[in-house]
Structures are given as structure tokens and as C-alpha cells.
Image: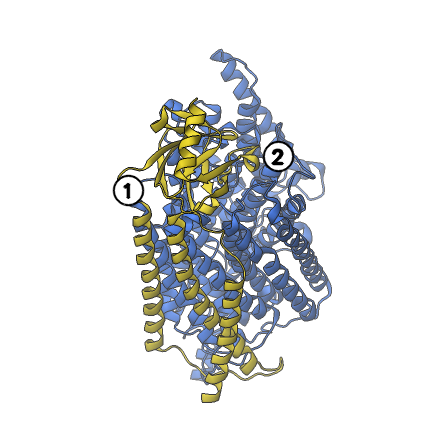
Chain colours: A yellow, B blue
Amino acid sequence: MRKGIVQLAAIGVVIGVALTLVAVLLQWLPESASEEFDRIQGVYWFATIISIGIFSLVTAVVIFSVWKWRVPDDDDEDGPPIHGHTGLEILWTAVPAILVTAIGIVSAIVLARNGEAGTRPLEVQVIGQQFAWKFVYPDFDDLETGELVLPVGQETRFTMTALDVIHSFWVPNFGQKMDAVPGIETTILVTPDRTGDFAVVCAELCGLGHATMRASARVVTQEEFDAWVEEEQA
Amino acid sequence: MTATHDHAHVEAYPEHFEPPPGTWRRLLFGPGLLRGAWMGALFFGLGTLLVLVLRWWWSWEPVWNTEVVLAVAAMTMAPIGFLAGIGSFDYWLHYIAGRPTRPEDHSGHGAQSWKDYFRVNTDHKVIGIQYIVTTFVFFAIGGLMAMFFRAELAQPGLQFVDSQTFNGLVSVHATLMIFLFIIPAFAGIANYAVPLMLGAPDMAFPRLNALSFWLLPIAGIMFVASFLAPGGAFGAGWTGYAPLAEGQPLGQTFFNMGVQWAGASSIMTALNFLVTIITMRAPGMTFWRMPLLVWANFTTSLLVVLATPFIAGSQFFVMFDRIMHTSFFTPEGGGYVLGYQHIFWFYSHPAVYIMMLPGFGIVSEVISTMSRKPIFGYRLMALSLIGILVLGFSVWAHHMFVAGMADWLRVPMMITTLLIAVPTGIKVFSWTATLWRGRIHLTTPMLFALGFVTMFVIGGLSGIYLGSVPIDIAASDTYFIVAHIHYVLFGGSVFTIFAGIYYWFPKMTGRMYDERLGKWHFWLTFVSFNVTFFPMHYVGLRGMPRRVFDYDEAFGDVNFVITVASFVLGASFVLFVYNMITSWVAGPVAGSNPWRAQTLEWQVSSPPPIFNFDEIPQVVAAPYEYGVAGARHAVMSPAREAQEATA
């Protein structure tokens, strides 16, 4: 049986290594452009490590069992009458409970951090309407634009609503998403930490033009942002 | 009740009750599809008249409102007329009217020819097959729709359809798969297997059972017919979120009402299962001796009975908003938009377990039998179902982490969501432990069961990502969700349905399916399933939202691969259908117990006798006593054995 355990472990390791390579070598996540998404990616990797472990374990046992104990069709014997094992059952109740609790704690911490507005966030109002986004900057005389422009490093609070149906404000590179709901206001925080051009995507089915309801988001330096505001207000 | 009794009842059936066969009177006025057709039309007319008279009476302009007429006449009255026509209500109406009823009428039992499958039949075995065949028809329709919009998605931009048709295809695909395939296909398998497994002659309420089947095609036809409505099919997704659904064209009403019929069917069946399981177990069949499929359907039925009224309510409210100008969910009238989502998900999250627990039951049967070992940790397996049932009601708002609901609800809902991984994990580990040191027969049902175990783990793990609020905020409403739901519902539920169909095929038909074709079917499905759905995790995380006909150029190549694989997946289904049909017609005779299983359904002939058991069996032990010398689950002829023992 010792040999069997070694073989089983070998199968598990092979699967685990293969999956780890797939997870690491492919670029699964968009490049993060916000502090919030940096933290979310941390949770993502934490969950990925646990997931690879569990998947490798289960798959290894299935493959090993079939390989080891498969019998020809006309075999008519029965296996050993093992009805259970209390210790094992407690173990596989407790270990997953601990693992998911760990994921839960990490998630709750990140969620709380991502929800902490700094002392003076930049306020941006987002208004969703079939099928376009409108951005309003109340700090700058309610400046209205169709393009989202943000200064890098500045915590920004988006307060959103919708005029007709539910839309969902999402910049994949920011990792933050929130529905814009008619009748209520919702908020989300983003602190861009990288300059560049990104896409604003509507993530909630909102009708015929849902797929084309996009806008662009531009993260610029503070000076460029000030210049942009001045230019827009002029 | 014994066999001789049953026989006496059949003879007591009054022959004069029906008009003589073959006459036009019988055809037109006897219960059947023809009477169903004209009574459906008649009731449609009555409904239309009712609407017109009332609207004229109250001087509502315009008197003719297509949507109201359709909702009342076509989607409420006509189905009732049809059901009355095919004879679903005959017994009850005779009883109410004081006319002679047939208290022990078994004329609607059993199927002598293929025509009996198109009649109201009260035999659970006939109803089971009616369910399964019907649901696979809708599976094929829903699958074709998926292939159609996958063709559209092979490249960015619009190719074949317009935007409303695309949204309609996506919505109807999901609706058919959920309400007309997965939920009722499980009901069909359970309908066939559960009474047999309990040692019961039938379900507790056979007439109700027949009625609940006939509600299904009504719902299915409504969903599909919505494509004919002016403005196209409902296109707000199967979730039908308000207020988008309230501004949809007429097709949305088909969804609102179709869900009512499908939901009513579910509730009736679930009640029937509950009463059957609680009251009709054979002597000795304690709860701790019930096969896990029975346990699974017991918990599923509790979920259905408690949760389904919520989706019915949510759809009625949307329809009232649409045609009666109420404002449950319209902010202008003081309605609360998020209220829809709370009510909807209070059903639709438990519905995920309604679509999964029966599959757990099937897989437990298959893995235990095919590994020739008792199921590992039987009691914990049953208790974990109860755990999922209870937790399942406390997680609905995890669908709403980005919906703008109260912030404080997020963390509690995340914790309960993550905790569901514990009872689910217990099941997965117990299945693998059942394999351990078994004598494994790698038959087609076993392949599907093992395919299920591995694929379901992927679906469960991606569920943990989505349960974690921060990851969900990034991944919600993207193709990652599409991948997750298909790993759970296709790699999960559909694989178990295939496992169940192959497993009980010899019992239902008395014939064996073609094992070689079955294995081809499995491998083709397994590989193309993974190539279709695994890359969706990737495009989703990278930034492709779901329910879009157009997407960023960068996702073009991956989507092309997905589309090609989805066509292979569709083609693999043809193998299955071919195998089923040819084997049913001319497969080798299977014998009563080809798998050497111990549960009761395998101890009677294939297909079983009309009332299942010639003698009510006496259950003496647990259902999976493989490898225990001399053990058996039940004594099939307790009277004779007692006689032999005294002789």
C-alpha cells in the first residue's frame, strides 16, 4: 500500500504542477491599474492556491482508483464492505471549513480596506442611460463629460445611478464594479495607481445596445488632470 | 395491498363508462389531444370575450389590448381548457359534480402502445418516461439556440442576428435549460425510480402526478412561442431583471406566464414526492435505509415547495407592472428596483440546489453500484443534503454583491456561501472514498458519474471565487459567471442526468444501450465541454462581460475556439439520441438486474410489472450492502419466505 500512496501522490503532484503552470504562465487577469485591484488579486491568488490543491487531490484519487482497481466487465466480485471512517469524515469536514473560513477572513479584510474612503476623495457621479455613460465632477462646477478622466494616485469615489434600467459600471483594469440602479444611489471606490487608457464597460444586460455601451477611462498625472479640467471648463 | 387485490380492481372497472371505442363521439368528447385542442380553442375564445367585455364595460381604451388578451386568454385560459380537454381534471370534476367516479380506476395505468404516452396516464413509470422524453426535446431546442448564438459570437460584431434576437436566444436558451430540462428531467428520473426504490406501487397522488407532467409542455411551448410575439422573444435574460423586463416587448409576458406553469408543475411534483416518501415506504424502509436518490429528492422537494412560490410572485409582480400599471419595481411609482432581485434570488439560489441535489443522489447510486462498495459515510451523505438545504436559503444575496444592496449584508452572505462548500465537500470526498479499493466497472453511467465529480469540483471551486466578495466584484457579470454556471449545471447536473439515463435505461426499457457508443458519447461530450467552457473563465476575467453580441477584438480567437467546440458538443448529443432510439427498439434484452444493484427497483422485472411489486417487499437492511456476505436490502416475497421457514 505504501507504493500505492507514493503513486497517488505522484499523480497529484503532476496535476498540481500542470495546473500551477497554467495558472502562472497564462495572463488570467487584466493588468491591475488600481490599489483595490492589487488587493483583490491577492485574494484571487490565495483562492487559486487552495483550489489547485483541492482539485489535484480529488482528481488524483479518481484517476488512481480507476487505474488501480478497475475490473473487467464480467467480474462479479464485490469490494470490501467499508461503510465509513469517522476520523476521515471529521477531517474532511473540518479542513474545508478551515480553508473557506480563511478565504472568508482574507476577503472580508480586503473588502473593508477597499471600502475605506480616504480623507478627501475625488467625487465623481456616474449616470447610466441606455446606452451611454455620463460622468459628472461636482468638485469642479458639475463638469460633465462622456470620457472618464482621473488623476493617478487619487482616491476616487464614484456615486452612481441610472435613468432607465440597471447598468453596471465596470473598468476591468480597476477590478471594481457596481450597478447603477434607477431610484437609488450606489457607490464604489477606486484609487488608480497607473496612468493609461482603459475601457469602461457596462456589465449588466441593459437592452439592445448593452454590448456597445462603452466609454473610455483615462488615468493621467495630477498636473495633466488639472490642465484637463481647466480646458473643459473654459 | 397485494397483487390479487389490484387484479380485482381492474376487473371492477366499469366498461360502460366510456363511449364505445373508435366512434367520432369518443374521439371528439373522450379525453385526449383532440378534445384538448378544441377545448383549448374554446377557452381561448372565452378568455378573449371576458377581457373584451370587461374592458368595454369599464370603458378602458383601447378595448383590444393584445398583451392583456394574450396573458388572460392564451396563457391562462387556453392551457386550462387544454388540460381539461386531455382529461386531467375528469376525475375531480366528476367527483365535484356528483357523477360516478372510478375510485380504483387503473385504466390510465401502464402503457400498452406508444399512443399511451400521449394521454393522461397515472402510472409513475409512464409519467417518468413522458417527462424524460419531453425534457430531452427541449434540451435539443435549447442546445440548438446555444449553437446559434455561439455562431454569432464566433467573431466580434453582428453577423447573423439582430440585437433583440440575440438577447432573446440567450434568454430562451437559459430558460428552457433550467425550467424545461434540468429541473423536470430530474423530476422524470425520480418519478420513475423513487416509488420503485421505496417499494411503493405508485406515487401517492397519481392524478396530480399526471397533471404536473402536462403543465410542462405548456410552459415550454410558451417560452419557445415568444419568438413569434411582435417585437421578438423576451430578451432580459432568464433572470428577467426589472425594470429592464418591464420595458421589454410583448415576449416578456410569455416568460412571466411560462414560469407560472413550470413552477406549478414543480410544486405539485414536489408535494407528491414528499407525501410519497413520508407515507409510502415499504415496511422496514426507515429513513436511514432509504437510498440516497430518495434522500436527495426528499430535500429537493422541500426546497421546491418552500422556494418556488417566490419566483412565481416575482414574475406576477413584473407582469402586473407591465399590464396593470402597478409599480412594484418602478422607481417612478415608488417601487423598489432591488426588491425584484431579492425575491427572484430567494427562489433562484435554492433553485441551483434544486438543479443539483437530485444529481448528487443519482451519482451516489451509480458510484456505489459500479464500485461494488457501500457508499462511504452514508449518514453524513444524507445529513450533508440537509445541510445544503438549510444553508441554501441563507445565501441568495451573493448574486447581488454588486447590485447596490445594503453593504452590511455582504459579509454574512459571503460566509454562508463559503460554508456551503463544507457539506458539498463532504459529498465529493465520500464519493472518492467509495471508489477507494472498490472493484470499479467503468461503464458509461460510471464515466459520467466520475466526469461529474471532477467537473463539479471545478464548478464548486469557481463558486468559491465568486463567493468571495472582492473577487466577485471583479468577476461578476462576466464570462467567468457563464463558465461557472456551466461547470455546475452542465459538468454537474447534465452529466448526472446522462449518468442516470444510462443507468436506468435497462430498467425503463428492458433493453441494454450500446456501451461502445455510450463511451464515445461520454468522451466526446467531456472533451468538447471543457474546450467550450473552460476558456470562458479566461475571457471573463480578462474583461468580457456576459450577454453581449459584440466584444473586444482581443477575445476573437478564444471565442472562435469556443464556438467550434460548442458545435462538437452539440454533435455529441446526436450520438446519445441515436444510441437511445436504436437500443430501445432493438437493443439486447437486459434482464432485471444488469448492474447487480441492491436497491429495490432492480429486484423486479425490466420494465417492472404494472404495480411494481407482486408483493410488498420487506426491507431488512441498508441499500448498499455490497461485499457483505449474505446481505440484502429487502426480502421480496416475505409471505413465501415465512412459509418456507415454517415448513
Residue B597 can be seen in this image: no
Q: Are marks 2 and 1 in contact (CB under 8 Å)?
A: no
Q: CA distance from mark 2 to mark 1?
A: 42 Å
Residue B174 in the image: state x and y as whole percent.
Answer: 55, 45
Task: Work out whether residue B386 or residue B109 is closer to the camera in this orientation and state it.
Answer: B386
**Residue pushed farthest left?**
A119
Q: Chain of mark 2?
A: B
Q: For this view, does B421 lie left or right of residue A77?
A: left
Amino acid type at circle 2 is: Ser
Amino acid type at circle 1 is: Gly
Residue at figure coordinates x 70%, y 39% from the top left? B160
Q: Is residue B210 above or below residue B612?
A: above
Query: On the image, numbered disc 1 is attached to which residue?
Result: A118
Residue B342 in the image: state x and y as whole percent.
Answer: 38, 40
Within the image, what quadrant is residue B23 found in? top right
Q: For this view, does A160 lie left or right of residue B367?
A: left
Residue B564 in the image: state x and y as whole percent.
Answer: 68, 54
Q: Of tags 2 and 1, which is closer to the observer? A: 1
Residue at figure coordinates x 69%, y 44% from the top left? B21
Residue B176 in the image: state x and y as whole percent.
Answer: 57, 45
Disc 1 residue crowd, few under 14, some 14–19, many 20+, Cα 10 Å: few
Disc 2 residue crowd, few under 14, some 14–19, many 20+, Cα 10 Å: some
Task: Work out whether residue B608 or residue B183 is closer to the camera in this orientation and state it.
Answer: B183
Within the image, what quadrant is residue B168 found in? top right
Residue B344 can be seen in this image: yes
Residue at figure coordinates x 34%, y 41% from the top left? A155
Task: Work out whether residue B39 or residue B533 is closer to the camera in this orientation and state it.
Answer: B533
Local SS, label 1: loop
Quadrant of the image containing the C terminus of chain B: bottom left
Local SS, label 2: helix
Q: Which mark is residue B163?
A: 2
Q: Chain of mark 1?
A: A
